Image (spheres, rainbow, N blue to C red):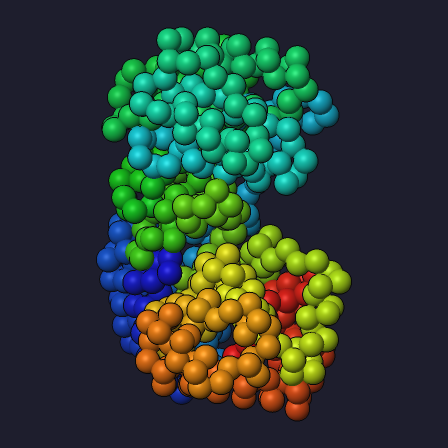
Amino acid sequence: MAFESLTDKLQNVFKNLRSKGRLTEEDVKSACKEVKMALLEADVNFKVVKQFVKTIEERAVGTEVLNGLNPGQMVIKIVNEELINLMGCEGAEIQFQPGKSITVIMMCGLQGAGKTTTTAKLAGKFKLKGKKSLLVACDVYRPAAIKQLEVNGEKMGVDVFSMGENHKPVDIAKAAMEHAKKNGYNVVILDTAGRLHIDEDMMAELSQIKEVIDVHQTILVVDVMTGQDAVNVAKEFDDKIGIDGVILTKVDGDSRGGAALSVKAVTGKPILYAGMGEKLEDLEQFYPDRMANRILGMGDVLTLIEKAQQNIDIDEDKEKEMASRLKKGKMDFNDYLESMKQMRNMGGMGAILSMMGMGSQLEDAIDDKELARTEAIVLSMTPAERANPKLLNPSRKHRIAKGAGVDISVVNRFIKQFEQSQKMMKQIPGMMGGKRGMMGGLGNMLGGKKGGMRFPF
């Protein structure tokens, strides 16, 4: 989970505050000191931390909190609001040129930050908005960089312009613009070369491109796993060539969050997107309020809904048929496999619970290995057995256990749980389908108009 370490530390601070009926000034100062340590350990810029904690303390040590009915919650509210302010108040978007004008975006960053992959991801996002993008391979130095862009572009269904490795990036960019004008593209994205570190040649090359081409958005891609180095890189790029926004990569693997909390405050430039995985679709628009909620362990239901709508693509007639069967308690193991597939597409059960604000409460109950074992059990069944659970006699169960590599008792327990869930849904139809039903409500929330995810347990 992104920023897991920081979330745990802050939740411990707030847990102590919630246990108090009223807060004294000393309580607030003590809590702020702990928040300060948590942020510094998360590699947040020291000056940013100092101002952040000072603001919280000034707001918290006052009648608004100390005389409040629930002062602990008020402090959490203040911290949440200040986290949002720190990361930019409102979500920022890449601005497109009006009418038929071509929007030119130059991607830059150090080598290894994930710039080329992010470039393709961004083009995929624009495609969903109806934009016709052209990816331009300007990295003529890194081996296989051009091929990587071509492969990713093909996966996203986006065209790639390349002239090979024997031309200067500035000439490639000029030729790409001519090609874009002739062929009706409205977005051109330049994938420029990265370096292992910032050097004068790199900056000069980027400046040359901006001199001969009207670049509308210069986007810096930074690896959040590098912590404060990412912030320093952002500041130096902005000072030397000027950037309009930042895209963070590897956010899903960063337990600290220092870069996300420092970039906007240090550079003044907005965070536009966050890379949440290696798949080409794993690029989320960055919303400061949602990220603040995640950091404080309060969940991010809106992003969960968006991920569900993007990843759950079920035929409407099939969905109605399945909903009807589930209400009648007639679900089968194929339904289970479908729900597991949907869950994986959304990042797994842990990610879903985390975005619902229940990750920490149910952390011990989540066992990915157990889920993998149950899926292996279902995959060891024949198609007929999956469609008709009543066929599962003792000899079939023994064969399934052997195929899944588990003890027969594990198979029996899984099947028993499945049968119990069938009976429960039959007794309470609203749980899966009704608008007021608990699971139906979750399903509607996750799936929107196309219907929801189905959890067989």
Q: Nearer the viewer, residue 70 or 314?
A: 314
* The residue positioned farthest toward the front in the image shown: 395
The residue depicted at 42 percent of the width and 75 percent of the height is: 400
Residue 23 is situated, as x and y percent measured from the top left of the image, at 37, 80
Q: Nearer the viewer, residue 274 or 324?
A: 324
The residue depicted at 37 percent of the width and 60 percent of the height is: 1
Q: Quadrant of residue 368?
A: bottom left
Residue 43 is situated, as x and y percent measured from the top left of the image, at 26, 52
> Can residue 443 be seen in the rendering of this structure?
yes
Looking at the picture, does residue 363 appear above or below residue 131? below
Q: Nearer the viewer, residue 49 or 104?
A: 104
> Can residue 94 be seen in the rendering of this structure?
no
Looking at the picture, does residue 386 appear above or below residue 46? below
Residue 396 is situated, as x and y percent measured from the top left of the image, at 45, 79
Q: Quadrant of residue 388?
A: bottom right
The residue depicted at 62 percent of the width and 36 percent of the height is: 127
The residue depicted at 69 percent of the width and 83 percent of the height is: 328
Looking at the picture, does residue 193 appear above or below residue 122? above
Left or right: 243 with respect to 202?
Answer: right
Residue 404 is situated, as x and y percent measured from the top left of the image, at 37, 70
